[in-house]
Image (cartoon, grey):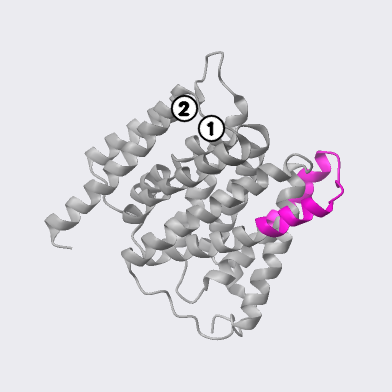
Amino acid sequence: MSGTGAVFQAPKQSNGRAILLVVAAMAFFAAVDAFVKLLSASQTAGQIVMVSSILTFLIYWFLLVAEGRSLWSRDALNPALLVRTFGEASGSIGIVFALGLAPLATVMALAQAQPLAVVMGAALFLGETVGWRRWAAIGIGLLGVLIILRPGVGAFDPNLLWVIVYIFGLAVRDLASRRLPGLISTAFAVAWSMPPMILAGWAIMMMQGGWEPIGFLTGIYYLWLVAAVSAALWTMTTAMRVGEIAVVAPFRYSRIVFALIIAYVVFDEVPDVLTWVGAGLIVGSGVYTFLRERQLAKTSGV
């Protein structure tokens, strides 16, 4: 017995379902980004991570209890789950810092390189086939990253390096989610990613000056943030478990559409020309990667 209580059946494989889940997750994550940026006006990055992680943990613990499963299980020490937890924690810390220090539109444009990192990781670590054309597309996407970052020039913003931490962390999370055993449920995986984030958030909060008061409006932002985080984590983790990574990953680019609308409407942000060029290269390379994958699938009769 795994010790998680009722037997959990692994989700049925379906690329179509996974694509819909990814698009929904991207809408939720765009909302998360907006609430994090709103909270950053009065809360430190560490406190945002800690408070949101505590509330998210309580939600998923409740879901486990409702499903008749136990949180306390040796499955929490599963290597894939531990790696997933590390990726979730580092990625979440990276994006919270980035959103607090840099414009939302620019952060989200750069973050679009994350699906390319997932495809690259799937080839390097999971044995998925990626031909030279898709490697070339990944290279073009990385060129787009450099255009947005602009290292070595006057416009370079070192705060955007936090987005690189986010890209790395979330790629690790998604790849590890693909390797989770079928007996480990999505709720169990998400719940166990929260305690390390709570501890990390607390440590960062203390280094940033300690606890900041939470007013009424700030509390409302936290509640909406946690609701969006919970929905986003559930849909994203399930999507990466039911679909092929190389097929569903490019649909993460839908996040930039939601994010740019929010950035313009809520924060009055408009990206500069080079940011648009870099984002275009990143998204274009991702779309090509998807089209190439579908072409290969048809050729092989899949």
Residue in the image at 52% along x and 39% along y = 108
Residue in the image at 48% along x and 53% along y = 26
- In this rendering, would 100 be left or right of 6? right
Residue 85, x across and y down, in percent = 59, 57
Q: Is residue 129 in view from this perspective?
A: yes
Q: Which residues are magenta?
A: 196-225
Q: Is residue 72 in view from this perspective?
A: no
Q: Main secondary structure of the magenta part?
A: helix
- In this rendering, would 75 be left or right of 273? right
Residue denoted by label 2: 275
Q: Is residue 201 magenta?
A: yes
Say above or below: 7 vs 42: below
Location of the N terminus by quadrant is: bottom right
Residue in the image at 48% along x and 26% along y = 148
Location of the C terminus by quadrant is: bottom left
Q: Is residue 224 magenta?
A: yes
Q: Earlier in the sequence, mark 2 or mark 1?
A: 1
Residue in the image at 68% along x and 54% along y = 197
Most foreground residue, 301 or 40: 40
Q: Secondary structure at mark 2?
A: helix
Residue denoted by label 1: 106
Residue 57, x across and y down, in percent = 68, 65
Tell me the distance, in whole angstroms, between the alpha carbons under discs 2 and 1: 7 Å
Pointer 2 and pointer 1: residues touching (CB < 8 Å)?
yes
* Image quadrant assignment for residue 242: bottom left
* Image quadrant assignment for residue 2: bottom right
* Image quadrant assignment for residue 136: top left
Q: Secondary structure at mark 1?
A: helix
Most foreground residue, 282 or 103: 103
The residue type indicated by label 2 comes to Thr
Most foreground residue, 140 or 265: 265
The residue type indicated by label 1 comes to Thr
